Structures are given as structure tokens and as C-alpha cells.
Image (cartoon, rainbow, N blue to C red):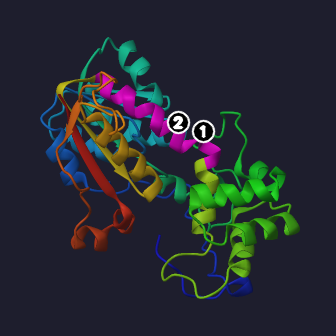
């Protein structure tokens, strides 16, 4: 999200009015050329985080034979269904988490697939909807659930019911926020908080200056709350082995992450799965019986070039990793 330099309450950047719910919602997928390069040609593909269907549209237009799209966001699935309607005979959409991709694939009779795409994190669609509570520059409820009908606790409950110690650890662990304790103490002192804008302004007032350029001071706290509400990191850890088990030999896994916590999990898992042994180095012989199951096709993550970063701000933090099943 681009920054707004106009001052708001307490010196914080001013909150923007949210877009109309009837405004066009198509968005530009990040690193789409690389996704096509690594996943096509393919007979069967899974887009585990289909969102509004940007990557899936490109894959189908590029010749993918059949695609299974998963998402927890019902609104996103409705948009994806509309966007992908020209290929309706080749597309199946399911309201499921990507950690359940094996069950979803098996329900179609798919035992193996040629490729899997995971575009992690929050989508542009969710950020643009004030009522979802993800966007710190929009006034909305503190929700942040990918599936608001899921019944899980929302961000408002987390903020208003957690102890100072729990909030400190949450902000430090999931947001890598260096002012974790200071901000947790402020929240406990000033709560209850009911809206995303209200919380963002309070964090801005409590955060020592100077702030990093282009980054709102509440960004890391909002990231931490979103990750905790949706159990994002554990979901990713559970999903990666599921993806590998579904791929045919030679099938490819592409993962796009947007912050270091996600990317670190993906990187370390890929490193482990391409090794023949994970025993401690002091052991004289291997005792783990592990065999490499994949190989990375790039040692370093692929990032957007200057042209894409200029035209699509969301791509600035994107990192793509790709591996092939042995």
C-alpha cells in the first residue's frame, strides 16, 4: 500500500476512505510471468490460495488443462468464479484451506497433480475492504479473519482479551516489532479497541519516531494480529508436506511469500527435503533413513523487477521459491 503523507490524528498518516464495495476488484497478480514459466505446461494444477483468480486466469489462458482453486474467503471465491467463467469446464473452486488440498484433490479423483501454487498472505481484495479489518488505513471493524463465518476469534477479541505479556510475545514473534512491549502496554492501558483505524492511530501515537519511510508504524502489529487470528504459519507448515505428497514426480511447487516469517519456513523446509540425511553431523552413520524428495530449481528466491515493482506496489516484498519433486 502506498503511504499517505497528510497528517492525521496524533500525527499519524490520515486514514483513507475505503473503496466502494461495488468498485471493480480485479487485481494484478504478482510475478505472473515466473509462475507461468515454472508451472506450464501442465495438465492438472492446484491454486491453493486462489483469491480473486489472477494467477489462475493466467494459467488457464496459458493452457493449463484443469485447475482446482481453494480459498477460505467466500467473497474472493465469488469473484474468482466470475473471473474464471470462460474456463468453467476446466475449473473447480472449493471453499477450503490450502492445508486441505489433498482432500479437495481426492474428491475430484486426482491422486497426483502437475503443479501447485501458493500465493501466501493477505490479498489486495481483503485490504481494499474496510469491513474486513485488514487495512490499517481504512476505518473498519477489527476482524481480520480470512473466513468471517468460521467462528474463530477475531482480532478484536485478541486485542481486548489478551494479557500484556501475550500481546508482547505475539507482536515480537509474528510482527518482529521492536517496540512490542511498549505497544502491548499501551493497548492494555487504552483498550477496548473496536476499529482498525482507532487501533492504528493509537499505535502511531505510541511509536517512537522516526518511522520507516512508506511504512505505517502499525504495519507490524497488524501483520502479527492477522497471522495469529488465521494461524497462518502453522497452516503453511502443515500444507507444505501435503503439497509434496500430491505432486507427481517432476511436478513443481511454487510458493510466493511476502514477509520473512513465511519465506523462512518455506526456505528451511525446501532445504530439508532436498537432503538425503538430516542426522546431526556428529553421528558416524546416518540413522534417519531420509531420502531427498525434491530439488530447488532456484537457490535464491526470484523477486519482481523494477518495472513490476513500479506498476504493482504489492510485488515489492514478494519472493518466489520453486522446487521440483524427484
Badge 1 local density, few (<14 within 10 Å), some, or many (20+)?
Answer: some
Residue 156: x %, y % from top left: 76, 53
Which image quadrant is residue 296 in? top left
Residue bounds of the magenta highlight: 228-246
Indicate yes or no whether the magenta region holds residue 278.
no
Q: Is residue 77 above or below residue 170?
A: above
Residue 305 at x, y = what percent?
22, 68
Where residue 272 appears, x then y in whole percent? 32, 38
Residue drawn where x is 53% and y is 43% of the image: 232
- Whether 108 is drawn above or below 160: the answer is above
- Residue 146 seen anywhere in this rendered image of the structure: yes
Viewer-side residue, 85 vs 137: 137
Q: Residue at x 42, y 46 (%)?
A: 265
Which residue appears farthest toward the top when viewing the image?
Answer: 109
Mark 1 lies on residue = 147
**Horizontal side of residue 159 vs 71, given as left or right:** right
Residue 167 or residue 43, whichever sits in front: 167
Instruction: Kindly state the secondary structure of the residue where label 1 is placed.
Output: loop
- Quick one: which residue is furthest to the left in this view? 41
Q: Which mark is residue 72?
A: 2
Q: Is there CB contact under 8 Å for labels 1 and 2?
A: yes
Q: Nearer the viewer, residue 108 or 247?
A: 247
**SS state under label 2:** loop
Q: Vertically, is 222 above or below 96?
A: below
Looking at the picture, how far across and down is residue 79, in whole percent? 44, 42
Question: Looking at the image, which is closer to me, 205 or 298?
Answer: 298
Q: Main secondary structure of the magenta part?
A: helix
Amino acid at each position: 500500500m502506498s503511504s499517505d503523507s497528510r497528517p492525521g490524528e496524533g500525527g499519524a498518516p490520515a486514514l483513507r476512505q475505503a473503496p466502494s464495495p461495488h468498485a471493480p476488484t480485479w487485481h494484478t497478480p504478482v510475478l505472473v510471468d515466473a509462475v507461468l514459466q515454472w508451472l506450464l505446461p501442465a495438465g492438472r494444477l492446484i491454486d491453493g490460495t486462489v483469491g480473486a483468480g489472477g494467477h489462475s486466469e493466467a494459467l488457464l489462458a496459458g493452457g493449463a488443462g484443469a485447475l482446482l482453486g481453494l480459498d477460505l474467503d467466500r467473497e474472493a471465491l465469488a469473484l474468482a468464479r466470475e473471473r474464471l467463467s470462460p474456463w468453467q469446464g476446466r475449473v473447480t473452486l472449493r471453499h477450503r484451506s490450502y492445508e486441505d488440498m489433498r482432500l479437495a484433490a481426492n474428491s475430484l479423483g486426482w491422486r497426483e497433480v502437475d503443479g501447485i501454487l501458493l500465493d501466501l498472505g493477505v490479498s489486495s481484495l481483503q485490504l481494499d475492504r474496510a469491513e474486513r479489518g485488514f487495512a490499517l488505513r481504512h476505518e473498519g471493524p477489527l476482524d481480520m479473519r480470512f473466513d468471517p463465518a468460521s467462528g474463530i476469534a477475531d482480532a478484536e477479541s485478541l486485542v481486548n482479551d489478551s494479557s500484556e505479556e501475550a500481546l508482547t510475545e505475539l507482536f515480537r514473534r509474528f510482527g518482529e516489532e521492536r517496540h512490542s512491549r511498549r505497544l502491548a502496554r499501551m493497548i492494555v492501558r487504552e483498550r477496548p479497541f473496536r476499529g482498525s483505524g482507532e487501533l492504528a492511530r493509537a499505535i502511531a501515537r505510541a511509536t517512537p519516531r522516526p518511522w520507516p519511510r512508506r511504512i505505517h508504524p502499525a504495519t507490524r502489529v497488524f501483520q502479527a494480529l492477522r497471522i495469529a487470528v488465521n494461524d497462518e504459519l502453522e497452516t503453511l507448515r502443515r500444507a507444505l508436506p501435503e503439497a509434496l505428497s500430491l505432486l507427481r514426480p517432476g511436478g513443481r511447487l511454487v510458493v510466493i511469500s511476502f514477509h520473512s516469517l513465511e519465506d523462512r519456513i518455506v526456505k528451511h523446509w525446501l532445504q530439508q527435503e532436498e537432503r538425503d540425511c538430516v542426522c546431526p553431523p556428529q553421528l558416524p552413520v546416518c540413522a534417519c533413513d531420509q531420502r531427498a524428495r525434491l530439488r530447488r530449481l532456484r537457490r535464491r528466491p526470484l523477486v519482481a523487477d523494477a518495472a513490476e515493482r513500479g506498476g504493482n506496489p504489492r510485488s515489492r516484498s514478494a519472493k518466489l521459491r520453486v522446487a521440483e519433486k524427484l
